[in-house]
Image (spheres, coloured by chain):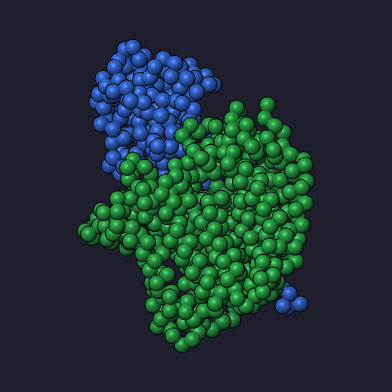
Chain colours: A blue, B green
Amino acid sequence: MNNYLQRMLLVAALLLLSAGAAVGLRNWLHPPLHLQAAKLLPEPVDIQDQGYLVRVAGDTPIYFDKNVSHWVMLYFGYTTSPDTPLVLQALGQMLKQFDGVDSQYKPMVIFVNLDPSQNKSDELEKFAQRFHPDMHGVTAHNDELARLTGFFGKQDWATNSSHIFILDPQMRYIGSLAPPHRADVLYTDMEQLTHQLWRYHVQR
Amino acid sequence: MSESGILSRPVHVGYLLLIFLIIDFPFQYGFRYLSLPESVSYTLIDAALYTTLLVITTRLDLARITLCFLALPYLIFIPGWLNLPTAITLMAIFIFCMMRALQNTTVLAHKVITGRDLLVFILVLLWVNLSGIGGYGFQWSDYQINNARLHDLVVNAWPIRYGQNQNLVYYFGYFLPSAIIGKLFTVDVAMRSVYVWAVLGVTLALRWLSYLSKWRYSISLVIIFVLFGPLDILNLLYIKKDLAEFLSVFHNDDMDTLTFTTSQQLKFYSISEQKLFFLGNYPGNSFQLYWSPQQLIAGWLCSALMMHLFLKNQLRHIVFVYALLFLWGALVMMALLPLVIVIAATQFFNKSLSSKERWRDLLSLENTLGAGSLACVFAIFYLGGSTAANPAYWLVDVVNWRTQWDLIIIFYLAAWGLYALALLPFILTCEPNARIWFGGLVCALAILPLRIFGEWSDLLCRGSAPLMFLLLVFLLKAIDYYWHNNKKIRSAILLCALIPGTASALLINSISLSYYGETEPVKPLLSYTSIYPNFGLDDSLFNQLFRRGLPK
């Protein structure tokens, strides 16, 4: 009986150890996110190989596929809109914070001009770089733009149009940042997301 | 090498189950971040599966279970792809030959499961988990097409036809058991089941390595198996005179590896605009498992079983065993062909046998009818595909011998030549059959690079896997032999000689670890525009003669 009891105690202790290790690992690898402006989708939506593209200076297309290998933040707007410089300024300040602390996690910020007739792509690049040298200003042909905005605005483009959309390095649309856009909030949210790559890759 | 007590003790099946529960739950709940109910159910399923696998690979007969492993995809392919008359005929022949092969296979001793078996199995679980198989660890870019193949085999009706002249023609035996599971459940379940299937195969391969080399089935064996590779590092030393430049290869944090780098550095990368990508090295075990398990595992198992049969003079179904590779990896088969020729030649020139005896075993029903019928169906199947569209050329035609003779020599030496030379004194002490087998192996290793075939030198790259496995068998056999015959210094020197060959494995494992969890999407093959589709024509001979349901 003693022997049996000892065995049972050992089994119970090992199971407890396993449960403890599981909880410890979970908290260590996936600490809860405290996002202020970012709203995540219940399930990431893959946009790879769907043919979505924008164009940078020289009309070179950027395809949203795994070759990008960065977190991507997309903001759609007009250069003439009064909101655009404010949002890009906030994004530029956010990038500066990444520069100072952990540049390896720095997301790629892309401003997509919604009116391709207004600006040439190289002028757009210069426009974006005024806010941060690593920021991209891009445009696309009308049909490409319509496809892209259609993808992100499937639910309600009017409501979402001022959002900043987030893609993970696997080019999956994982959520968006709601206005008003403040540099410190953008940084805090993106810093958590980019550092917790695990959460979006391992669990699914 | 004394037996340490606790590891040699038998472990009860109930304890195995408990240990797997304890290990798997933190992985599911803590690592994979599943919900509690999901974690509990996955843990229970995994623990039951792992216990079953461990029992199968330890307690059951190694040769028979290997035969069953290799044969299973045929039981799915034959009714799934072939028309009724062909399916009935081939299935009858196949089952008949399998039964005879199973009956006539040497029974390898049954064992109890010890703590050491358990530890080794856990290491295999970790290695296969890291390799990207099953969608857990980091998946290298070939997984785009691997995942797509599995996806399509689950989702599409068999035989798969995507459209006009787009019939899937590929050696997809590895995926078929999981595809069936996927058809019963979901694509995701199919993906996870590949992991279980691969763990079974890799554990069997490790068992064979231990059995053939007489090296104890132990942690050290797993470590050597995982790390074994060619001496690519010598290529690099030869090319890169500067130490800093040499070391920079190991600080490469992108998707590159030593294997790729040496090919590139040996300037075989783009001779005459043609891709000679993998000429320059025979990839190591880790590299092979991480990139192409669908051909590799069967290659290991089949070559091991063939070696076992040859050493035991059991040739009655050796060609049939070889033919089992048709559905798993045609390129691996081609690489092993010289060994089959050596088997036939040995039998033919064996003066101790009468002329009737010489051919009795080789011309058995399994070797003729069984292997022949498989050869007939699959030769026609693959010829109806994109085989001819693959780039193919002779090495002599594309290498500039005046300027590159030194590179060819160093490639041969570093890939396997130095290992083979180091083995020569030991080989002379071996039984005649082992010497002949080693001779055949050296021939196969030497011949393999002469014909470059496939967009990424696939024949060389994939075909080298079973040959390197057999080379490792001999290396371990020699180390073990020297150790037990009071030649411990020789044994240690030979063991140390394996160390430079671990560089590629260290690099690929560390990269896989750092990118752990980044997987390729599981989506249809046709959603990719840039990958090689392996399509066959509608009017192929296979479609006309054997295919189930002709294309409309």
Q: Is residue A170 visible?
A: yes
Kindly identify the residue that appears in the image at 62 percent across and 31 percent down: B538
Report the number of discs: 0
Q: Where is residue B151 in the image (x, y as percent from the top left)?
A: 60, 39
Q: Position of residue B434 (x, y in %)?
A: 54, 74
Q: As rendered, which of B371 and B459 lies closer to the eye?
A: B371
Kindly identify the residue that appears in the image at 49 percent across and 69 percent down: B439
Reply above or below: B145 against B70. Answer: above
Q: Which residue lies furthest to the bottom in this view?
A: B486
Q: As rendered, which of B468 and B408 lies closer to the eye?
A: B408
Kindly identify the residue that appears in the image at 28 percent across and 32 percent down: A134
Reply above or below: B363 against A66. Answer: below
Q: Is residue B515 visible?
A: no
Kindly identify the residue that appears in the image at 63 percent across and 46 percent down: B378
Reply above or below: B11 against B50. Answer: below
Q: Which residue lies furthest to the front in this view?
A: B355
Q: Where is residue B66 in the image (x, y as percent from the top left)?
A: 65, 62
Quadrant for the C terminus of chain B in the image? top right
- Left or right: B532 with respect to B200? left
Q: Where is residue B472 in the image (x, y as percent from the top left)?
A: 48, 68
Q: As rendered, which of B367 and B467 lies closer to the eye?
A: B367
